[in-house]
Image (cartoon, rainbow, N blue to C red):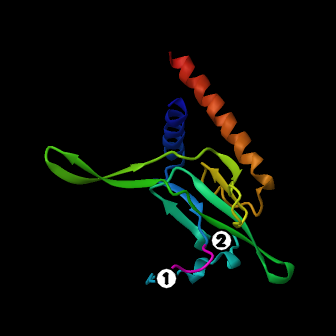
């Protein structure tokens, strides 16, 4: 519970200090989603260059995400890919109250900052690594070898925040 409170406090403080209404993350797609009418080919990961055209607002996320994966195809050829986006945290559901259904939405906090490898539980699947971070454009690094910087900054911010909260008591 304290972890969630800290996440909310950290998000509110970052909004106050930056003046931005929502988190900004880099977004790039492996391929354009079918059936969409807007032009997403401008944000293909193969063209990712840290430019403004890859920056999106994340009003329903408190974290950015980076997904790294490797595809082994025939004849020993390996394709490496990195997808960047807002962390999927929006939860929409219907609430039944006083004999009526009404739509509800909440932002969940299911992730911890840092990187993790997906355990395929013995299935033959594509090795995938997910990285989550809480600051604007923090999903920019080309590989996960530099993710520790985000973790260290997060620890410093939380430590200083806890020190400030304790001084108010």
- Image coords of residue 44 (percent x, y): 63, 78
The quadrant holding residue 42 is: bottom right
The quadrant holding residue 139 is: bottom right
| One can see residue 159 in this view | yes
| One can see residue 118 in this view | no
The residue lying toward the viewer, choosing from 96 and 156, is 96
Q: Which residues are magenta?
A: 29-34
Please give the name of the residue rendered at 71% of the width and 43% of the height, measured from the top-left corner: 151
Task: Report helix, strand or loop for mark 2.
Answer: loop
Say which residue label 1 marks.
Answer: 34
Marking on residue 121 = none
Extreme-front residue of the structure: 122
Extreme-right residue of the structure: 76
Say which residue label 2 marks.
Answer: 51
| Distance from Cα at disc 1 to Cα at disc 2 | 24 Å
- Whichever of labels 1 and 2 marks the residue nearer the N terminus, that label is 1
Question: Relative to residue 140, is residue 103 drawn left or right?
Answer: left
Extreme-left residue of the structure: 99
Q: Is 137 in the magenta?
A: no
Q: Is 31 in the magenta?
A: yes
Please give the name of the residue rendered at 46% of the width and 82% of the height, measured from the top-left corner: 38
Magenta segment main secondary structure: loop
Please give the name of the residue rendered at 50% of the width and 15% of the height, measured from the top-left corner: 169
Please give the name of the residue rendered at 59% of the width and 67% of the height, measured from the top-left corner: 27
The residue lying toward the viewer, choosing from 21 and 162, is 162
The residue lying toward the viewer, choosing from 27 and 129, is 129
The quadrant holding residue 86 is: bottom right
- Image coords of residue 33 (percent x, y): 52, 79
In the rendered structure, are the residues bearing label 1 and label 2 in contact, judged by CB atoms less than 8 Å apart?
A: no
- Image coords of residue 79 (percent x, y): 77, 76
In front: label 1 or label 2 = 1
Question: Relative to residue 168, is residue 124 drawn left or right?
Answer: right
């Amino acid at each position: 519970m304290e972890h969630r409170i800290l996440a909310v406090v950290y998000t509110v403080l970052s909004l106050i200090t930056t003046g931005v209404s929502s988190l900004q993350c880099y977004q790039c797609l492996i391929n354009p989603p079918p059936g969409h009418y807007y032009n997403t080919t401008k944000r293909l990961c193969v063209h990712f260059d840290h430019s403004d055209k890859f920056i999106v607002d994340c009003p329903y996320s408190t974290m950015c995400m980076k997904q790294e994966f490797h595809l082994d195809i025939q004849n020993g050829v390996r394709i490496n890919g990195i997808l960047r986006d807002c962390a999927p945290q929006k939860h929409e559901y219907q609430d039944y109250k006083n004999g009526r259904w009404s739509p509800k939405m909440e932002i969940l906090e299911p992730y911890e900052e840092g990187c993790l490898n997906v355990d395929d539980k013995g299935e033959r699947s594509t090795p995938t690594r997910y990285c989550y971070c809480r600051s604007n454009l923090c999903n920019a690094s080309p590989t996960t070898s530099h993710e520790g910087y985000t973790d260290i900054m997060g620890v410093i911010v939380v430590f200083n925040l806890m020190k400030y909260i304790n001084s108010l008591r």
